[in-house]
Image: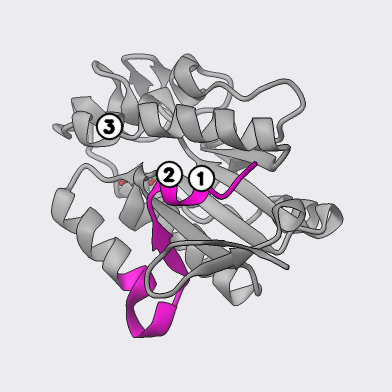
Amino acid sequence: MPTVASARPSPFAFEPTTTALLVIDMQRDFLEPGGFGESLGNDVSQLRRTIEPTAALLRACRAAGLAVIHTREGHRADLSDCPPAKLARGRPSQKIGDPGPMGRILIRGEYGHDIIDELAPAPGEPVVDKPGKGAFYATELGTMLTGMGIRSLVVAGVTTEVCVHTTVREANDRGYECLVLADCVGSYFPEFHRVALEMVAAQGGIFGWVATSTDFTEMLV
Ligand code: TIU
């Protein structure tokens, strides 16, 4: 019998052995006060409210023996994996690869590119480095999930309408059942966050399910 968690638009059924927690882009460049995200005028408190529930979620998933995978958005130091169109869309003074408050912006190996201390990966947990918004594009995530026998993804991270949405859409097309945890995903724009979650669960769950982290963790033993 599968485990079933309360969710919208319908209960979410999953097998813990074939379910992975995917924590998307909880990086200093996006979340830290004084970092890249804030320097663009964004309100990082909208993202930082996800830290505590996601830390609790990580503890619960690790205790239950669920697979945990982290992602980071970023690029090679020479920017050879950054499409010119992506590079061109930043603010003129704050482009990917420019010097930022925590090292070169969104460049692998820089301090700001790494995951915040509160949600640091545990030893052995894979970290997928991705050049795009979606976690499947140009990464080894799909191969990894197939090898692990994963069929369901529980999704946390930032930002709701950008990398979380893109990844959930990619995952949905690849046949994964996705549960997005509303208190563990965040956007700089509260309205985008709200509507992005509505979009996941609309039309009978067109991209997946939405629940709170406690709806999910209370079903883990
Ligand atoms: N991780 C992620 O969502 N990357 C972004 O660039 N998000 C924005 O909302 N800008």
In this rendered view, identify the residue nearer to me: 211 or 124.
211
Residue positioned 29% across, 20% down in the render: 35
Residue 13: image x %, image y %? Answer: 59, 67
Residue 178 is at least partly visible in this image: yes
Q: How far apart are marks 3 and 2 (CA)?
A: 15 Å
Q: Which disc number belongs to residue 214?
A: 2
Q: Are marks 3 and 2 in contact (CB under 8 Å)?
A: no
Mark 3 or mark 2: whose residue is earlier in sequence: 3
Residue positioned 52% across, 44% down in the render: 217
Magenta region: which residues? 199-221
SS label for mark 3: loop
Query: How many tags in the picture?
Result: 3
Q: Please name which of the two marks, 1 or 3, marks the residue nearer to the observer.
A: 1
Q: What residue type is labelled 1?
A: Glu
Q: Are marks 1 and 2 in contact (CB under 8 Å)?
A: yes
- The verdict on label 1 being within 8 Å of ligand 1 is no
Number of other residues with Cα within 10 Å of mark 1, as a class: few under 14, some 14 to 19, many 20 or more = few
